[in-house]
Image (spheres, helix red, strand yellow):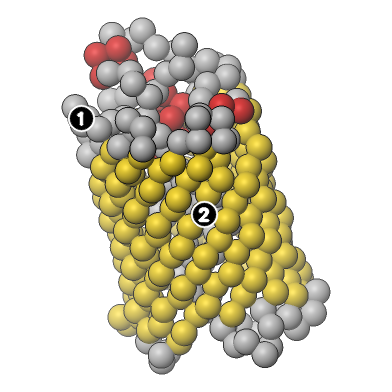
Amino acid sequence: MKTIIPYVVFGCLATPNISLHAQSGQSVTENAVNFEDIRRGGLSVPAHASVTSANGGDFGNTVIREPSEPQKLTLGASADGSWFYTDNALFTKSGRKSDNYLAVSAGLSARYAISSEWEADTGIRGGLFRFDKFGILDFRNLDFHCGLTLSPKALPGTAFYTRYSFTELMANRSGDVFYTNHALTLGAQRSFTFSRAHGITLGVSGQWAVTDPTDVQRDDYNVYAGYKLRIARDFTADLLYRLNYFVYREDGARHDFRNSLSLNLRYEINPNLAVSAIGFYSFNDSDRDFDYRAGNLGLSAGLQTQF
C-alpha cells in the first residue's frame, strides 16, 4: 500500500535553504491517507514507496553568484544545521497539521576551471531530518552531482549548464532505501547587476529523471526570478520566485503547477560562518486531487571552507 510518509519526507527537501545544498529537491505530491491513519501508528516506511523526483540543478537557489578570480581547482567542505516550523507537515489539502523539524547536513565539493568559459563541478552530501510530532517521518538522504557550466565571454552574466544528479532516501528506523533518483538537468540563466548592492537573476531549466519506484517519474520544467540586495557589508537578502510545471509519465499524464516564493536573510559572521532566517511559501495545483498549500519559517547556521 502506498503511504504518505515518503511523499512528506521528500517534501522537506523542497524547503529552500534547509542548507545551500539541500535546496535541489522539489515539493511532493500527496497521497490520500488521512492524519488519523498516521496518528494510530498503522503506517510504516516500505522499502519501495512512491515519491517524486528531485531537481538536479541548484542554479537560481543561490540567486546571484558572486564574481571571483578563476582558479584551476577549488575544493570545498561545508556543514550546516537548521530548524524549521511548517504549517502543513503532511502536505495535505485539508486537515493541515503543523510540526517542527531539524535538518543537519555535510558535504564535499570540487570545481575545476577547464578554460576561461568552461567549468566542471562535482559534489557529494548527506543529511539527517528529524521531526518533533511525526517521528515516523524521520529520514536520511544522500546526494551526488556532477556538471558542466558554460559562461560565454560574449554574453556577460549568462550561463548555460548541464548536470547529472543522484538522490537516495533512506528510512531512519529501518535504514531501508525507499527512493532513488537519476536525473539530467539542462538550463540557462542570466544575471543583471545594477550595482554592488543589488541585482536580479532570471533562469529556466528542464529535468528528466529515472526513479525507483517508477510510478512517480516526471518531467520538470521551471522558470525562476531572483532579487539579491546587500543591505550591509555582511548582511544580504535574497528573494526568489519559482514556477514548476510537472508532467508525470507513469500516472496517466498527470500535470501539476507549483508556485513557490522564498525570502532568505543571511548574515556572515566571518568568511566561514553564516546564519540565516528563512521564510518559504508554496502552493501546488494539480489536474488530479493533489492540491496543497504549505508555509515554512526557519533558522539556519552553516560552516564552509574552500582551499
Residue picked out by circle 2? 221
Residue drawn at point x = 34 percent, y = 53 percent: 259
* 50 displayed left or right of 149: left
Residue drawn at point x = 67 percent, y = 41 percent: 182
* 147 displayed left or right of 287: right
**Residue 156 horizontal/vertical position (percent):** 60, 87
Question: Hey, what amino acid is under mark 2?
Answer: Tyr
Which is nearer the N-term, disc 2 or disc 1?
Answer: 1
**Residue 92 horizontal/vertical position (percent):** 28, 31
Closer to the camera, 11 or 125?
11
| Number of the label disc, if any, that sits on residue 290 | none
Classify 10 Å Cα crowding around label 1: few (below 14), some (14-19), many (20 and above).
few
Visible residue check, residue 96: yes
Closer to the camera, 136 or 200?
200
**Residue 13 horizontal/vertical position (percent):** 45, 43
Closer to the camera, 94 or 196?
94
Q: In this view, does 7 lie above or below 274?
A: above
| Number of the label disc, if any, that sits on residue 94 | 1
Residue drawn at point x = 32 percent, y = 30 percent: 289
> Which structural element holds mark 1?
loop
Closer to the camera, 139 or 244?
244
Visible residue check, residue 300: no
Q: In this view, does 99 lie above or below 13?
A: above
